[in-house]
Amino acid sequence: MSSPLSLLLQWLSFFLILCQIFYASQADLGTASQYSPPYTPSACFGSDSTQFPSSNFFAAASEGIWDDGAAYGRQYLISCISSVLPKACIPGETIQIKIVDRAQNLTSTPTRQGTTMVLSTAALAAIADSNAPSLNIDFRQV
């Protein structure tokens, strides 16, 4: 028969593993393309250039995450999972972006229509080869 301490350690181990699995599933999977300047006017902040973070890591939201405009200013952690362009992703690279626009209202044309997010050129280049027309991404709101 197992000692109470041994049972407690087994349950604690099980609980910690379960917590790790749950934490890992907090992120969503989606797709991303990129768009080039001009970035204004935007659906969120018009022609105000102070809307853009100093890192230039920002994006436009698709209808799936737009949430009737509630996406304005939301921040997401994004990493590249894969691309149609082989070896395009920069392994282990994660960036934080800010939603500044609505994808269907962009002034410039994205490299691919219908993606979850349309990233600024700087944001996409930070996680993948900028020649990639689109990416499969992992994203999580922060």
Image: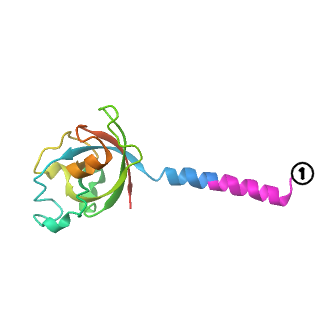
The residue singled out by tag 1 in the image is: 1
Relative to the observer, which residue lies in front, 38 or 42? 38
Residue 70 visible, this angle: yes
Q: Provide the residue span drawn in magenta.
A: 1-16
Instruction: Please tell me which residue is depicted at 35% across the width and 34% down the height of the picture.
Output: 87
Q: How many badges with numbers are in the image?
A: 1
> Residue 2, how many percent across, how many down?
86, 53
Q: Is residue 9 magenta?
A: yes
Instruction: Please tell me which residue is depicted at 13% across the width and 65% down the height of the picture.
Output: 49
Residue 73 is drawn in which quadrant?
A: bottom left
Instruction: Please tell me which residue is depicted at 26% across the width and 47% down the height of the picture.
Output: 124
Relative to the observer, which residue lies in front, 71 or 55? 55
Residue 120 visible, this angle: no
Q: Is residue 90 magenta?
A: no
What predominant SS class does the magenta segment belong to? helix
Question: Would you say 3 lies left or right of 71 here?
Answer: right
> Residue 41, how many percent across, how many down?
10, 59
The colour scheme is rainbow
Please state which amino acid type lies under the numbered disc 1: Met
Could you tell me which secondary element the residue under label 1 belongs to? loop
> Residue 64, how many percent across, how many down?
29, 49
Residue 70 is drawn in which quadrant?
A: bottom left
Outermost right residue: 1
Instruction: Please tell me which residue is depicted at 10% across the width and 64% down the height of the picture.
Output: 47
Count residues near mark 1 (Cα–Cα under 10 Å), then give few for <14, some for 14-19, many for 20+.
few
Task: State which quarter of the image contains the C terminus.
Answer: bottom left
Question: Would you say 48 lies left or right of 131 here?
Answer: left
